[in-house]
Amino acid sequence: MSISIIINPIAGGRAGAAGARVDLARRIAAEYSENADVLVTDARGHARELARAARASGASRVIAWGGDGTVNEVATALAFGDIPLGIVAGGSGNGLARELKLPIRSEQALRAAIRGSARSIDVGTIDDRLFVNLAGIGFDAHVAAQFNAPHNRRRGARGYVMLTARSLFTYKRRRYVIIVNGERLAVDALLVVIANGTEFGNRMLIAPDARVDDGALDVVVVREGSRAATICSMPWLIARRVQRVRVWSSRRAQNVTIESDAPMPFHVDGEPVMGGTTLRATVHPGALRVIA
């Protein structure tokens, strides 16, 4: 029985890093006398295919080396099964890796992923798409779409911040109807986040009370009265004190429905998706084994 290490060679904007990552993965696996299949992705969706093949072949664990999107693809293939997911953070945000308090340095993360023990965490689905950290509707989905667009050359954390700043001057808020815990809320919102974990990544906290193993999702709404007020609130997000912002609110639920007059773009762990005028999200307690 072997382990599979799936590497996204361009995660985090590090073009040309594939060879070094492959060499490091093979060296660390050999140190632990592990038979490792080291695989490199070549397109979006390839990590999911490789993880499905690893699951079918009976791999003992599958390690995703990349960003939140790579982790999402591998998690989608492993969820509702017994094979654990290991993570080597290599992306722009690394939200789930930070949530699980995993090492950020690649060598330390590889050692933890190969030798660490597994625990169960929840996963969420929205519009039948799985997410392990966050799903978002509104502003963050807009930024995710811009960041993942083929023409975008600004990769890495700095590129994401620049796109976010630019989008603050162009994005138009929308009205949503949110049905949660039997309550129907109509709000003009900058964004709606369905949170399994606590942060977007890069230590930007959005759902401070969320827990990945509590059997629930945190439904976070950031209302917007004016764009100037929104911009003035940004320092609280960076300072991890978003709950002090008056327009921020959160509710815990197992299911939530979001409605809008027009089709809603959304993202799952940073990967953009185009949805319809109604989106339904639900939690699946303990559906994924992760190495932590």
Image: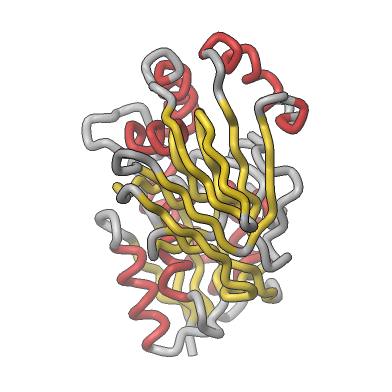
Q: Is 254 situated above or below 57?
A: above
Residue 243 falls in image quadrant: top right
Residue 174 in the image, given as x and y percentages of width and height: 42, 29
Residue 76 falls in image quadrant: bottom left
| Image quarter hosting the C terminus | bottom right
Q: Is any part of residue 97 visible from this angle?
A: no
Q: Is 142 situated above or below 96?
A: above
Q: Is 180 situated above or below 207?
A: below
Residue occupying the far left of the picture: 151
Report the residue at 65% width, 38% height from top: 206
Q: Is any part of residue 284 visible from this angle?
A: yes
Residue 204 falls in image quadrant: top right
Residue occupying the far top of the picture: 228
Q: Nearer the viewer, residue 190 or 269?
A: 190
Residue 285 in the image, given as x and y percentages of width and height: 63, 73
Q: Is residue 234 left or right of residue 30?
A: right
Q: Is residue 129 left or right of residue 103?
A: left
Q: Nearer the viewer, residue 89 or 173?
A: 173
Residue 214 in the image, given as x and y percentages of width and height: 73, 65
Report the residue at 45% width, 63% height from top: 130
**In the rendered view, how is the structure colored?**
secondary structure
Residue 252 in the image, given as x and y percentages of width and height: 69, 54
Q: Nearer the viewer, residue 246 or 139?
A: 246
Report the residue at 50% width, 48% height from top: 90
The number of numbered badges drawn on the structure is 0
Report the residue at 68% width, 37% height from top: 249
